[in-house]
Image (tube, grey):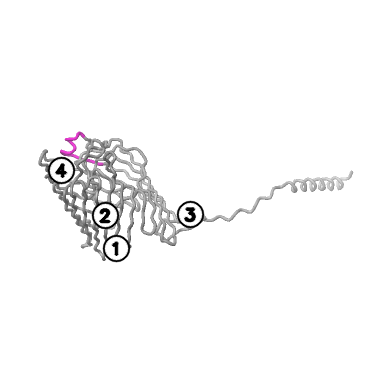
């Protein structure tokens, strides 16, 4: 056998082998086209289309750490701590889409709070107002969850009373209740005017009580002037409350004033042993004033003062004397984009007819990252 014959034979064998392997080769399928996430700008910043749908989704929230502090009679007399740390994780998932009836919105808002040394609900008093106080809590809850279309909203969400002033020194809502509950609401209007009415399952409970609240509000804005009037009736307490507020851009800031009237408290007590009015239970009437000064693009100062008259109630729920003054300031500073701090301090003076007068200072320092 010559060298030429050997080379030709080897080449033929390799070609045959390669043909056999080629016959067994797997041919990969063409990749399917990828649908990239598209920005949805119809509902503002932060929305994107869910791939394969015309529904726009927004995912956001914040992470907050704060330390509350308090000193004086209210803290000495109830044996509570004079400081308390609190961590919160807050997540919003909001979906929107267009329909023949208008925008369909669904919102799911989760909140996790960790405050290991908070005051148990059963131990709270009216003096433990807001700045340091809070329930012992280490669980995740549904802060809000609702459906909204054509002006109708159903689910758990904040009512109109939740929209108080920008600072942290006033009492414009209930002490022992909540501004977020299961509700059915209709609201008509736009950015310049609105009017609405709601049926609300109030948080206060009295055994087999119905817990029904009826709430209404009108409001709007004209140029740099804003206004709102709201009224609520607690069917269990058989009492109601009215709040009127307005704001105006004056100089480098905004001046806000409000007046509140509450007809009384229930003659029964709720599950925590408190007489209640689901809309306002801090006193018979109150006036509040605040001026928020925008010192710079990053820094604002909001001093405020509030007077509450008739803070005591008798066994029948009738207002029965006493008064409270609150004066404080809230400082806000934006460190960088989406990272801010808040410091607030409030001086409170309670004068009771049938109990010793009390004076104290309370507040908190907060660090918050929004996304």
Q: Point out residue 336 in the picture as x, y percentages from the top left corner.
A: 33, 52
Camera-side residue: 182 or 56?
A: 182
Residue at (26, 65) in percent of width and height: 222
Of the two numbered discs 4 and 2 in the rendering, the one whose residue sits closer to the viewer: 4
Q: Is mark 3 on a helix, strand or loop?
A: loop
Q: Are marks 4 and 2 in contact (CB under 8 Å)?
A: no
Q: Earlier in the sequence, mark 4 or mark 2?
A: 2
Q: Is mark 2 on a helix, strand or loop?
A: strand
Specify few, some or many for label 4: CA neighbours under 10 Å numbering under 14, 14-19, or 20 or more.
many
Q: Name the residue under label 4.
A: 313
Q: Point out residue 318 in the picture as x, y percentages from the top left corner.
A: 15, 45
Q: Are marks 2 and 3 in contact (CB under 8 Å)?
A: no
Camera-side residue: 166 or 310?
A: 310
Q: Mark 2 points at which residue?
A: 299
Disc 3 from disc 1: Cα separation: 32 Å
Residue at (33, 39) in percent of width and height: 114
Q: Point out residue 253 in the picture as x, y percentages from the top left corner.
A: 23, 59
Disc 4 from disc 1: Cα separation: 37 Å
Residue 50 got which mark? 3
Q: Mark 1 points at which residue?
A: 193
* Left or right for 112, reference 260: right
Of the two numbered discs 4 and 1 in the rendering, the one whose residue sits closer to the viewer: 4
Of the two numbered discs 2 and 1 in the rendering, the one whose residue sits closer to the viewer: 1
Camera-side residue: 61 or 356?
A: 356
Q: Give the range drawn in magenta.
A: 68-79
Q: Are marks 4 and 1 in contact (CB under 8 Å)?
A: no
* Left or right for 249, reference 156: left
Specify few, some or many for label 3: CA neighbours under 10 Å numbering under 14, 14-19, or 20 or more.
some
Q: What element carries label 1?
A: strand
Disc 2 from disc 1: Cα separation: 30 Å
Q: Which of marks 4 and 1 is nearer the N terminus?
A: 1
Of the two numbered discs 2 and 3 in the rendering, the one whose residue sits closer to the viewer: 3
């Amino acid at each position: 056998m010559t060298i030429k014959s050997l080379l030709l034979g080897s080449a033929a064998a390799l070609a045959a082998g390669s043909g056999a392997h080629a016959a067994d080769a797997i041919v990969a399928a063409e990749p399917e086209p990828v649908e990239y996430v598209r920005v949805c700008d119809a509902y503002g910043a932060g929305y994107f289309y869910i791939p394969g749908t015309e529904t726009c989704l927004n995912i956001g929230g914040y992470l907050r750490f704060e330390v509350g502090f308090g000193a004086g009679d209210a803290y000495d007399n109830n044996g509570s701590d004079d400081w308390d740390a609190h961590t919160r994780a807050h997540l919003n998932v909001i979906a929107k889409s267009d329909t023949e009836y208008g925008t369909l919105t669904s919102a799911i808002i989760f909140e996790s709070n960790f405050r290991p040394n908070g005051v148990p609900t059963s131990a709270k008093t009216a003096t433990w107002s807001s700045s340091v106080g809070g329930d012992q809590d280490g669980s995740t809850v549904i802060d809000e969850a609702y459906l909204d279309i054509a002006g109708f909203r159903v689910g758990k969400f904040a009512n109109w009373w939740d929209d108080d002033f920008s600072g942290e020194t006033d009492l414009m809502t209930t002490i022992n209740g909540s501004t977020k509950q299961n509700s059915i609401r209709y609201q008509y209007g736009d950015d310049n005017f609105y009017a609405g009415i709601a049926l609300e399952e109030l948080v206060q409970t009295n055994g087999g009580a119905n817990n029904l609240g009826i709430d209404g509000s009108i409001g709007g804005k004209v140029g740099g002037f804003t206004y709102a009037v709201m009224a609520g009736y607690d069917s269990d307490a058989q009492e109601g409350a009215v709040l009127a507020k307005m704001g105006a851009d004056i100089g480098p800031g905004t001046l806000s004033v409000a007046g509140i009237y509450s007809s009384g408290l229930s003659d029964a007590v709720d599950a925590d042993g408190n007489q209640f009015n689901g809309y306002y239970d801090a006193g018979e009437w109150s006036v509040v004033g605040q001026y928020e000064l925008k010192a710079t693009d990053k820094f604002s100062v909001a001093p405020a003062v509030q007077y509450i008259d008739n803070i005591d109630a008798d066994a029948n729920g009738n207002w029965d004397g006493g008064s409270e003054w609150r004066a404080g300031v809230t400082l806000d500073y934006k460190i960088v984009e989406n990272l801010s701090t808040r410091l607030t301090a409030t001086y409170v003076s309670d004068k009771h007819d049938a109990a010793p007068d009390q004076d104290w200072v309370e507040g908190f320092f907060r660090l918050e990252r929004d996304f």
